[in-house]
Image (cartoon, rainbow, N blue to C red):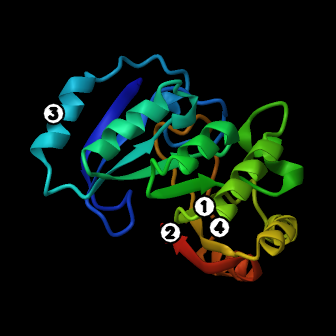
Amino acid sequence: MHIAGWQKVSLVDYPGKVACTLFTGGCNLRCPYCHNSELLEGEMPSQDMEEVMAYLDVRKGILDGVVISGGEPCLQSDLVPFLARLKEKGLLVKLDTNGCFPDRLEKILDARLVDYVAMDWKNDPEHYALTTGVGESPLAAVTRSLEALLSGTVPFELRTTVVEQLHSKQSFEQIRDYLLPLTGKNGKKIPAFYLQAFKDRDTVPFAGFTAPDKKALEQYGALLEPIADTVRLRGV
């Protein structure tokens, strides 16, 4: 596992839990508004794995769980055995993913190696490639990942980082219309859909992005209510 960085204690990365967050190096996407662009190429040195594991042992009873974020964790070829090792420690495990690797996600879900999944839903179908900064849209793979989550039993959320220059009311109408047949087929709504207000910082690759105001985000969220049990805002 290439652990490019870690936050020893987080109260916000795993809902309702005290967690240690591990950031994997490398990502297959190039979202122009990415907050963790320093992790994209996977060139940062890896943390000492035994040091990480020793820390988790020492903090047993204080930490509820571990968040595996990135970058994109599902790029890591040894992610599955690593998650199994964490579960052997009795820790809750949350996986943050962009959904582009449904085969690996399905294997993880089938083996019950995670307790919660947060998956990105970047934009409407027409603008998915633009929003992810790649030539070919990964939407088909992300859709497969969502179908795996909907047909499974592991709690999960979808999340969209909302950027004024990339999203509009029409974007969320089209997201709703695209996802409605999926939720209908599975007879199960998305448990939680979070709209995260974009926040600028030094590591964002391109300048000039802003977040919509709270009123606009609330309007966007209302459009998603037919497909989600809960729609909430973050960062406002």
Mark found first going from the N terminus, 4 or 3: 3
> Residue under circle 2?
234
- Residue 81: name its quadrant: top left
Residue depicted at 61% across the width and 37% down the height: 104
**Tags 1 and 2 in contact by the CB under 8 Å rule?**
yes
Marker disc for residue 222: none
Quote the CA–CA distance across marks 2 and 3.
33 Å
Quote the CA–CA distance across marks 2 and 4.
12 Å
71 in relation to 212, above or below? above
Single out the residue that lies furthest toward the left: 58
Label 2 CA crowd tier, 10 Å (few <14, some 14–19, many 20+) = some
93 in relation to 78, above or below? below
Q: For this rendering, which residue is in front, 61 or 201?
A: 61
Q: Which structural element holds mark 3?
A: helix
> Residue under circle 3?
54
The quarter of the rendered structure image containing the N terminus is top left
> Residue under circle 1?
159
